[in-house]
Image (cartoon, rainbow, N blue to C red):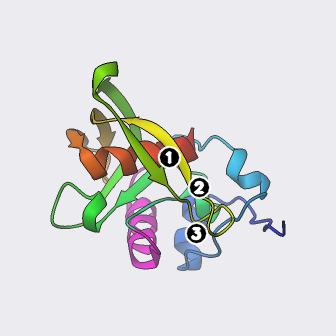
Amino acid sequence: LKGTTVPLRSAEAAAQADVIGLMGLYPDPLLRRIASPVTRFGPSIEKVAKLLIAGMKSDAITALQYGIDARIIALKGAASPNSTPLVFVNPTILARSGEERMVSWREICLVLPPNLEIDLLRDEVVEVAAQDVYGVPFRKALSSEAARAFQHELDHID
């Protein structure tokens, strides 16, 4: 397999470059990293969120997949619980549905080889805590496709 070697950069560097850059492709070592928490909020984080949303090739993505070392997830379209894109900074799962409410999903991933599909179980409902691009904490209950997509993206940054 021919992957990529996307360099790791800070959110500030990505915002200053004003470009999202290339997405890491398996077996890029970037994809095995744990993203660093965002500790400084401001124009750089807001800019990275806008770049992520503008460059999305699917309904869900993380900053780390583009080599940006920041715990940021963006959801839009069918993956967003809102009618507009939703950005989660420093997201965590607070609560999950019970084992009896796990849902089987067939997933693909843009960073893996084309046509690779994986069957797995995801929680039907998750309660999430995060911050917005300004550092303001919020909580959100996600279900169905939004819950699945969020969990998939959280796997990327964890």
Query: From the viewer's perspective, is residue 150 above or below residue 110?
Result: above
Can you give x and y, in whole percent of width and height, for residue 101 in the image? Answer: 28, 27
The quadrant the C terminus occupies is: top right
Write down the residue under mark 1: 71
The CA span between labels 1 and 3 is 14 Å
Write down the residue under mark 2: 64
- State yes or no: discs 2 and 3 in contact (Cβ < 8 Å): no
- State yes or no: discs 1 and 3 in contact (Cβ < 8 Å): no
Q: Quick one: SS at disc 2? A: helix
Q: Is residue 143 left or right of residue 65?
A: left
Write down the residue under mark 3: 14
98 in magenta: no
Question: Within 10 angstroms of label 1, few (less than 14), some, or many (20 or more) residues?
Answer: many
Q: Amino acid at mark 2?
A: Leu
The quadrant the N terminus occupies is: bottom right
Closer to the camera in the image, 20 or 149? 149
Q: Tag 3 or tag 2, which sits nearer the N-term? A: 3
Can you give x and y, in whole percent of width and height, for residue 145 in the image? Answer: 29, 52
- The stretch in magenta equals 40-58
